[in-house]
Image (cartoon, helix red, strand yellow):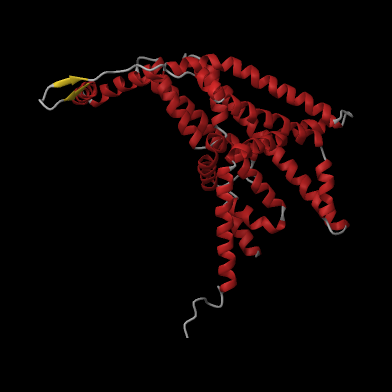
Amino acid sequence: MFKPFSSRFGLKHFQFLAVFVLAFVVLVVALKAASAILIPIALAWLLGALLSPAVRYAQRYHIPPTLSALVLMGLVVYGMVLLFLLMIGPVEQWLQEIPRILRDFREKMADFSGPLSSLQAVTEEVRQLYVIGDNDRMTPVEVKVERESTLGTFLLANLPVLLAGTTIVVFLTYFFLASGDRFLRKSTQLGANLGSRRRIVRIAYRIRQDISRYLATITVINIGLGLCVALAMRLLGVPNALLWGLMATCFNFAPYVGAVVMVGLLTLVGIATFPNMAQALLVPGVYAMLSIAEGHMITPLVIGRRLAVTPTAVFLSVVVWGWLWGVAGALMAVPLLASFKIVCENVPQLMPISRLLDNSSPKRHRRFLRAR
């Protein structure tokens, strides 16, 4: 008699797998649909975890969390406004230079491809201006010049969304910081007895400490990379060096993808800045060397192997969160993945997932398998 399911994989297992897949699909659709509200919440949670050590340190000197959180959020808002005012001018200038940069890029690429490609490019431009009619005569096409969109018009068009998201992040981060250990104390009620409650507190403290340490460490590393990039761009003579250092700091939260984007941007910046192609390619080359040194030497040395995540998981996380939440998701992908790994490390039921994401050496995995 034919059995559709073997004894090792029965109908109950198939039903569980189907429910799991269906729940995963529903979760992905919900994350995609509710991105407008989930992005500020996730950003506020990460920012709260980053700033929570400062609030706990202030408590040692009998400063209430409500006051220290208010001061911290005031400094954060002041810093954001100051950076915005400093960067809006250079960003507006470079956005207006994009057509000229692309034109210079095509011209310099034509020098490498030879005269034939130059002739083809000229022919293509002529064909865009004229259309061959029925009588094989060239008929001019009317060209309308539209007003270029600037950064100011973009900000004005999206001002309600930006203000709403910023307000949610600021107030929610303040509430996370001002609550202190109140939520942690309430979570102990989930335990059935005194021993389980102590275990919940111990796990929660370890998770909070490890996540705060990781976020603080990776933020300091990215700021250091941004300062090095800004100094290098200043020495190379690239205008608005502080802008490229700030962008390097932000994009470094999205490994691999952020580095590729920065190399492409700095290539165009180098071509727009220097007449010689060798000097132009030196700009992205210097950034690539700094990024490689940070990713392969500094970050593994500072963070250590325990908090390191396998590169495959990092790349997939950046791609998936970027698809779900756009640029914000790509920038938060690695901190969210590392936080999830830390949670799995401290919860016994989720330890197999943490070992799957772990980037430890093969010797450690072999010792673990022998122990099993």
| Up-down relation of residue 58 to residue 99 (above or below) | below
Relative image position of residue 128 (x, y in whole percent) = 24, 24
Residue situated furthest bottom in the rendering: 1
Between 360 and 138, which is closer to the camera in this rendering? 138
When asked about the image quadrant of residue 140, the answer is top left
Residue at 56% across, 43% down? 33
Residue at image coords 71%, 42%: 210
Instruction: Locate residue 316 relative to residue 161 in the image: left or right.
Output: left
Q: Position of residue 25 (x, y in %)?
A: 55, 54
Work out which quarter of the rendered image holds the C terminus and state it: bottom right
Say which quarter of the image contains residue 272: top left
Q: Is residue 198 above or below residue 89?
A: below
Q: Residue furthest front?
A: 134
Looking at the image, residue 211 lies above or below residue 150: below
- Visible residue check, residue 118: yes
What residue is shown at x 70% (from left), y 24% (from top)? 76
Between 107 and 281, the one lying in front of the other is 107
Total marks shown come to: 0
Horizontal and vertical percent position of residue 349: 69, 59
Residue 362 in view (yes/no): no
In-image side of 362 versus 198 (left or right): left
Whether residue 223 sits left or right of residue 182 in the image: it is left
Who's the residue at 48% across and 28% down the image? 262
Residue 227 image point, x, y percent: 58, 22
